[in-house]
Amino acid sequence: MKVNNQSRRSFLKRTAGLALPAILPSSVFGFARRVTPSNKITIGMVGVGDHGTGVNLRGFLAQPDAQVVAVCDVDGKRMNNARDITNRQYGNSDCKTYRDFRDVIARDDIDAIMVSTPDHWHIPVSVMAMRAGKDVISEKPTLTIWEGRLQAETVKRYGAIFQTSTEDRALQVYHRMAEIVRNGRIGKLQTIRVGLPDARRANPDGKPEPIPPDFDYEMWLGPAPVAPYCAARCHFNFRWIYDYSGGMLTDWGMHLIDTAQWANDTERTGPIEVSGRGVFPSDGLYNTATEFHLEYKYRNGVTMFVEGGGVMLRFEGTDGWIQNKGWIGPLEASSSAILNTSIGAEDLQLYTCPGREHRNFLDCVKSRRDPYFPAEIGHRCASVQHIGNIAMLLGRKLRWNPDKEEFVGDGTANRMRTRVMREPWKI
């Protein structure tokens, strides 16, 4: 089934761009460990591209107990646009602009950092911010298994609040599907089928182009290998280049595979085996898989299949099935009893927040409770996709030990759990 890959982004922009409420008195809200004297949680935005502005910046501007005080981007046009949106919302000119995220982290008056950079910058920015005493909400995914583990351990070491920034756990269709499965309404879970969008696209040659005058390309590359600038490499399209991301598997997999892990009660562990095949471009700039056909096996006997070509999520059990097709498509089930079942007070009720990820993050900054998608769970979800990419790249079945987070008896695969960072960057 083919879907419009813009549908999810359109949904986010519609819901994030609703009329913004007036700023309420600070006395309405509870106190937090690091909240400013005005009782506003001050936010520094690192990365203000399309999603960083249209969803994350506007998401925080809509919160009466948050105050965006800084925006940072290597692209001057995007940086200034985000500043202007922020100042118009607050009716002042107080929002400061930065090219280097370290200058934002260094500000003592900032409580939290929102990271909306390309994937290869997610962990370095997040880890540096937490070491400086900031709470962090960051876009997904991680770049490597090793980086994800480092991030999860940094959260614990510094007592930081960390939110993996996706909305799925707040969306009724995915939350309800996971609760129905976890409460045994389809019997014993046997099979999960995950469909992700079509990953095939035109592949540019990547010929060098002049760097735009208001774009710090060296900082954009950061820890990634040196490569000549071209427009097709940067901004949204970084997703299709393995130096910066993991392709459609990691981009959309962080959404649908998270619900799969949630419903399977494996969100803090992972599969024990992965096999499959991928189709990778033989030439051109983009080199992540354009097709992927993956099979994962879990200790509890569940098998999960992940395929490209269309968004869907299906759970099959001994007593029936439940599924949806398309992004936030309506639920379908093998019987009306499953579809209309009620989840009562005596049943397992999964943690959510109807206000979505930004609201949940702010609440947790105050309460010091883990958000609904904390670092450990985000790392475990991304690891499912990373081991899938590694299996496809190596072209063989791999055994995975989720307790040790290592491949069993495969040194080559284990070396692919991390990547070398370009000097002088390190974390």
Image (cartoon, rainbow, N blue to C red):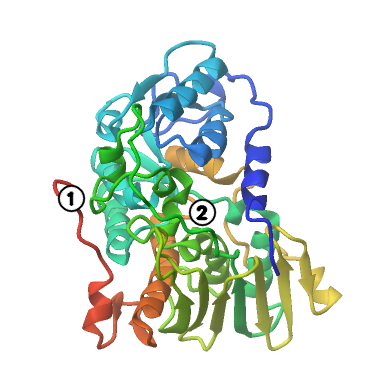
Mark 2 and mark 1 in contact? Answer it, CB < 8 Å. no
For the image, the number of numbered tags is: 2
Image coordinates for residue 346, horizontal then vertical, percent: 68, 67
Instruction: Specify the amino acid type for callout 2.
Output: Tyr
Image coordinates for residue 26, horizontal then vertical, percent: 52, 21
Q: Looking at the image, which is closer to me, 331 or 268?
A: 331
Image coordinates for residue 388, horizontal then vertical, percent: 42, 75
Spot the residue most to the top.
92
Q: Which residue is mark 1?
A: 426
Crowdedness of circle 1 by 10 Å Cα count: few (<14), some, many (20+)?
few
Indicate the secondary structure of the residue bearing disc 1.
loop
Decide if residue 287 is on the left or right side of residue 349: left
Decide if residue 302 is on the left or right side of residue 231: right
Indicate the secondary structure of the residue bearing disc 2.
loop
Q: Which image quarter holds the N terminus?
A: bottom right
- Residue 311: which quarter of the image? bottom right
Task: Please determine whether, in this image, residue 137 is positioned above or below residue 346.
Answer: above
Q: Which residue is mark 2?
A: 372
User: Residue sitting at 38 percent across and 32 percent down?
Assistant: 75
Q: Looking at the image, which is closer to me, 67 or 78?
A: 78
- Residue 303: which quarter of the image? bottom right
* Residue 181 seen: yes
Decide if residue 417 is on the left or right side of residue 377: left
User: Residue sitting at 25 percent across and 52 percent down?
Assistant: 157
Q: Say which mark, if any, is on residue 343.
A: none
Q: Earlier in the sequence, mark 2 or mark 1?
A: 2
Instruction: Specify the amino acid type for callout 1.
Output: Lys
* Residue 41 seen: no
Q: Looking at the image, which is closer to me, 36 or 174?
A: 174
Q: Looking at the image, which is closer to me, 206 or 25?
A: 206
Crowdedness of circle 2 by 10 Å Cα count: few (<14), some, many (20+)?
many
User: Residue sitting at 58 percent across and 71 percent down?
Assistant: 308
